Image (spheres, rainbow, N blue to C red):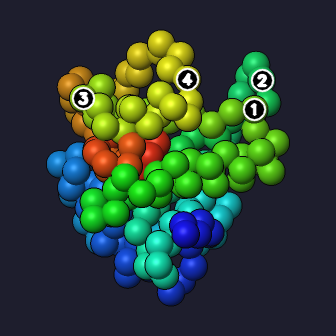
Amino acid sequence: MIETRRLEPADRERWEELFRAYLRFYERELGQPAYDRAWREIGSDARLHGLGAWLDGELVGLAHFLVHPSSSEPDLCYLEDLFTDPAVRGRGVARALIGAVRDRAREEGCGSVYWQTHESNTLARRLYDEVGTFGGYIVYSLAVDGAGDRAGSGAGSGAGAGDGDGGGDRGAEDVGAR
């Protein structure tokens, strides 16, 4: 059975292993200060929230999300990162994490949960097509440092890498919600 719950201090080491694997999926690497900052934010549970999924007592998946206001509807919940350990994909971990984020968003009064994924992440997109609705929107990003990386400097991650219970994605399930 899959258990989902908030990440706790004792989960730090395994969380970092999973988060590093998620970022590798998107060919990204961060310095240690970035992991430390993310963990602090998740631990504070104020702006950035983190949930984990446990299977047979082992942390095998993670979800990072945040709630933000909307100008035209109730608050929204953005599922930023979603990752499932490749060894357990296909066993419902990503689906359970998405459901847990949805439940938390409901508790926070949100109108919906949304995420992004890379168009090539077909495995994760299969799951996303089952649990969510593709609204047809295209996402753009713009670096604020003026570097001019118009090809997408990794300005976000996205739920979905290793999501879809079997593949990688930049959206909201198992591997990389961005």
Q: Nearer the viewer, residue 172 or 12?
A: 172
Q: Are marks 2 and 1 in contact (CB under 8 Å)?
A: yes
Which mark, residue 133? 4
Q: Which residue is mark 3?
A: 120
- Mark 1 or mark 4: which comes first in sequence? 1
Measure how far apart labels 2 and 4 are at the Cα level.
17 Å
Q: Which residue is mark 2?
A: 73
Q: Which residue is mark 1?
A: 111
Q: Which residue is outermost to the left?
A: 27
Question: Is 55 above or below relative to 142?
Answer: below
Q: Which residue is outermost to the top?
A: 136
Q: Amino acid at mark 1?
A: Gly
- Mark 2 or mark 3: which comes first in sequence? 2
Q: Amino acid at mark 3?
A: Ser
Which one is closest to the eye, mark 2 or mark 3?
Answer: 3
- Mark 2 or mark 1: which comes first in sequence? 2
Q: Secondary structure at mark 1?
A: loop
User: Could you tell me residue 50's position as x and y percent?
Assistant: 56, 62
Q: Amino acid at mark 4?
A: Thr
- Mark 3 or mark 1: which comes first in sequence? 1
